[in-house]
Image (spheres, rainbow, N blue to C red):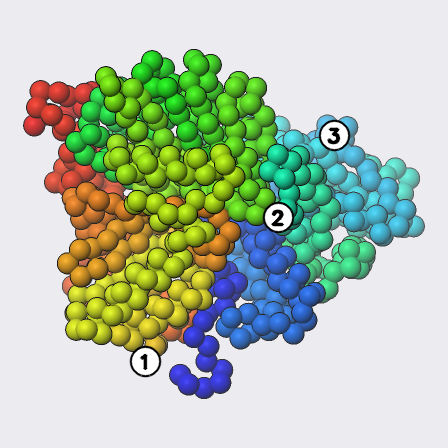
């Protein structure tokens, strides 16, 4: 492993594509219901679009600045871009094969989506004429006009005998059009993709002209929103609004063509957009398969989705005074989605109405539309409470929604903090202040995931409810800093970025390294994160491995660390779990001699999280909860041999299978079963059993001690 070709780092971009391969593999799992498999295909497409808009766009900018630049693994950026192309084409080919198979199975179940029109007939033309008024014709006088095309929207290119044109439609236009089959079979569950029908019937839009070719296409543009670091915070909202308008016209980084071949029309498009060959992608797969989410959500086919089996642990439906009383005696840990996120929603709803609550503060990154959390905060403001909300206006691809949300909050008297021009606020924090007798109780919720009730049903996250005074003071400091437009620095218990977190994690790794060199055989590091792409941390972990520290890394996505290399990383094991729920919680465990440390956080181990965001890692102080996270959550994830893949020294991921005599173990299934039984036998059971003779709306079957 000392040859010149060996790099201690795995290429970040190719590692991410390997993650998307793992998502694609879930679509092949025949143990999943059909629509759930279809969902994974939609996620693959969504992931790829974002990958090109962010990562590939960044590489293209880097090459433009420095043509011979290399990434940390030593690969030339130009070579990386060509490898990305080959990988994506292969991935899309596999996606197409799986899609055809699943659609065939769905057809047998009464749900039909046509993605190919072998031959246009009168029935198709009849349907095409119905949507004719919705379609707009863009007449371009020169190829340069193609730069007006909006990114991420589907169009149909039409080449005529003496000219060319583009067909488009409103953003809200429904891509799922009733198929001609619907009239024959008398069913509303037969669809055709609008762009396929429009391309096939393009002659309708150009009477007395010869259509030489017509095909759907889409351009992906650089989605980076550049904000001048010197921007006045008071002007941030309007500056971001302007940047969002400009995003639709930024540099094209990918042209996608849905056609059998790269035709003259496709070449004209590519040359007009000044694209290199590596940026042109032709598929025999429909564009933008996020549309498959629509099929996944059809109510009539609930039997083809995951069923809600057994009794999950529902919301702790307590009144605010009861929750405060309960949490005074113990911190409450929530594990979503096994625990309903309704606990957090109902807490905010109750706080909005509780006359003793006088202030609510919250950070919002991604909230979702029609959020009950937003409604609760507005209700609190209407009742005269001091409501302060930080909204991250630059949460990528949620900018427009968050800008509108900020304006709505202001209309109702909510104090909106709009943050920094060069730092994103990514921490997930709520503080409720309540007067109780002569005392002010600071009730804090802090977690690893967004305040989004919809994604909380799909993502695994951890949250802590506490009345710890040190947590209350640290939360106060966070919100005071945000209000004063200053970066929070030191805390009693929190460890925050951009000032402390990176250095602190390095210190924790180095401490385990020193302990191991001093003869401590128990030195151990466990990290559950979504990405590991920070070079300094990777190098520190290598040193720890050489010193004999046992290291378990559970990395959902990109990982630049190369495990299992003799003399470098043989004590490091890296696994990834892609499952029914998206693994999203971040957990840091350090053995720390006889005093184990467990921190939860919103931060992945990425330079942007450490240096470009305000993040918080918070400790678990309760020894029982600490033990639960270590011995139940992390241990089950480490032991998973059903959905886990292991990263090998050569960068390949292999599916873990049970050894001979070893029983199967699936972590998410274990967590589901625990929740169904109200966590009996674990420290979380005490959440339902507070003080003697005080049931506080206990779940059915749970009795107070």
Residue beneath the point at 49% across and 82% down = 5
Q: Is residue 279 left or right of residue 102?
A: right
Residue beneath the point at 30% across and 29% down = 443
Horizontal and vertical percent for residue 703?
11, 25
Horizontal and vertical percent for residue 33?
39, 42
Cα separation between marks 2 and 3: 42 Å
Q: Nearer the viewer, mark 1 or mark 3?
A: 1
Q: Residues within 10 Å of mark 2 (few under 14, many from 20)?
A: few
Q: Nearer the viewer, mark 2 or mark 1?
A: 2
Could you tell which of marks 2 and 3 lies nearer the N-terminus?
Answer: 3
Residue 229, numbered label:
2
Task: State whether residue 143 is above or below residue 371.
Answer: below
Looking at the rendered structure, the secondary structure element under dot 1 is: loop
Q: Which of the image's four quarters has the N terminus?
A: bottom left
1 and 3 marks in contact (CB < 8 Å): no
Say which residue label 1 marks. Answer: 567
Q: Which of the pair 22/300 is nearer the observer?
A: 22
Task: State whether residue 69 is above or below residue 143.
Answer: below
Cα separation between marks 2 and 1: 44 Å
Could you tell which of marks 1 and 3 lies nearer the N-terminus?
Answer: 3
Q: Residues within 10 Å of mark 1 (few under 14, many from 20)?
A: few
Task: State whether residue 82 is above or below residue 617.
Answer: below
Cα separation between marks 1 and 3: 64 Å
Could you tell which of marks 2 and 1 lies nearer the N-terminus?
Answer: 2
Residue 134, numbered label:
3
Task: State whether residue 443 is above or below residue 558.
Answer: above
Q: Which of the image's four quarters has the C terminus?
A: top left
Q: Is residue 104 visible?
A: no
2 and 3 marks in contact (CB < 8 Å): no
Looking at the rendered structure, the secondary structure element under dot 3 is: helix
Q: Which of the pair 150/414 is nearer the observer?
A: 414
């Amino acid at each position: 492993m000392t040859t010149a070709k060996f790099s201690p780092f795995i290429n970040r971009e190719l590692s991410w594509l390997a993650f998307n391969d793992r998502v694609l593999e879930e679509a092949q799992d025949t143990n999943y219901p059909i629509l759930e498999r279809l969902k994974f295909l939609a996620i693959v497409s969504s992931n790829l679009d974002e990958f090109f808009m962010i990562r590939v766009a960044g590489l293209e900018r880097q090459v433009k600045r420095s043509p011979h630049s290399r990434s940390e693994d030593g690969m030339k950026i130009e070579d990386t871009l060509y490898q990305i192309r080959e990988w994506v084409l292969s991935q899309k080919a596999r996606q197409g094969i799986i899609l055809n198979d699943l659609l065939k199975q769905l057809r047998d179940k009464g749900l039909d989506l046509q993605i190919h029109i072998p031959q246009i007939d009168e029935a198709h033309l009849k349907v095409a004429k119905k949507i004719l008024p919705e379609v707009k014709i863009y007449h371009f006088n020169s190829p340069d006009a193609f730069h007006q095309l909006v990114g991420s929207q589907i169009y149909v290119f039409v080449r005529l005998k003496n000219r060319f044109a583009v067909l488009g439609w409103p953003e809200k236009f429904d891509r799922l059009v009733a198929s001609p089959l619907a009239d024959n079979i008398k069913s509303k569950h037969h669809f055709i993709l609008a762009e396929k029908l429009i391309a096939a019937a393009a002659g309708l839009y150009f009477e007395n002209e010869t259509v030489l070719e017509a095909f759907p296409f889409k351009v992906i543009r650089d989605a980076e929103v550049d904000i001048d670091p010197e921007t006045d915070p008071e002007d941030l909202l309007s500056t971001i609004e302007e940047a969002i308008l400009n995003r639709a016209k930024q540099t094209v980084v990918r042209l996608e063509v849905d056609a059998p071949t790269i035709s003259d029309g496709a070449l004209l498009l590519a040359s007009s957009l000044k694209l290199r060959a590596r940026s042109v992608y032709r598929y025999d797969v429909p564009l933008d398969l996020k549309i498959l989410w629509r099929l996944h959500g059809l109510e009539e086919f609930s039997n083809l989705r995951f069923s809600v089996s057994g009794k999950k642990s529902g919301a702790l439906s307590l009144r605010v005074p009861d929750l405060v009383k309960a949490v005074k005696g113990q911190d409450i840990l929530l594990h979503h989605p096994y625990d309903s996120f309704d606990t957090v929603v109902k807490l905010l709803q109750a706080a909005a109405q509780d006359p003793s609550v006088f202030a609510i503060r919250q950070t919002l990154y991604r909230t979702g539309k029609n959020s009950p959390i937003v409604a609760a905060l507005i209700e609190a403001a209407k009742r005269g409470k001091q409501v302060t909300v930080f909204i991250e206006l630059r949460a990528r691809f949620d900018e427009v929604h968050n800008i509108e949300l900020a304006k709505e909050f202001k209309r109702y008297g909510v104090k909106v903090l709009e943050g920094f021009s060069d730092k994103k606020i990514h921490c997930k924090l709520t503080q409720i202040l309540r007067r109780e007798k002569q005392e002010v109780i600071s009730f804090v919720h802090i977690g690893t995931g967004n305040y989004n009730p919809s994604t909380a049903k799909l993502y695994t996250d951890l949250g802590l409810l506490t009345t710890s005074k040190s947590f209350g003071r640290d939360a106060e400091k966070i919100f005071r800093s945000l209000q004063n437009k200053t970066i929070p620095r030191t805390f009693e218990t929190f460890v925050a970025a951009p000032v402390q977190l990176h250095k602190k994690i390095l210190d924790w790794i180095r401490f385990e390294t020193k302990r191991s060199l001093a003869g401590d055989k128990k030195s151990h590091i466990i990290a559950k994160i979504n990405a590991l792409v920070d070079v300094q941390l990777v190098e520190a972990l290598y040193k720890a491995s050489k010193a004999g520290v046992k290291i378990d890394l559970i990395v959902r996505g990109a990982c630049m660390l190369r495990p299992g290399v003799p003399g470098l990383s043989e004590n490091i094991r890296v696994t990834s779990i892609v499952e029914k729920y998206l693994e999203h919680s971040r957990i840091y465990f350090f053995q720390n001699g006889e005093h184990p440390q467990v921190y939860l956080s919103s931060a992945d181990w990425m330079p942007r999280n450490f240096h470009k965001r305000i993040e918080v890692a918070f400790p678990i102080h309760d020894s029982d909860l600490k033990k639960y996270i270590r011995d139940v959550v992390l241990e089950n994830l480490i032991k998973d041999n059903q959905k886990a893949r292991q990263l090998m020294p050569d960068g390949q991921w292999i599916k873990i299978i049970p050894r001979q005599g070893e029983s199967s173990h699936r972590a998410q299934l274990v967590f589901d079963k625990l929740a169904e039984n109200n966590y009996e036998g674990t420290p979380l059971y005490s959440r339902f059993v507070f003080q003697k003779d005080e049931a506080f709306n206990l779940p059915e079957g749970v009795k107070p001690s």
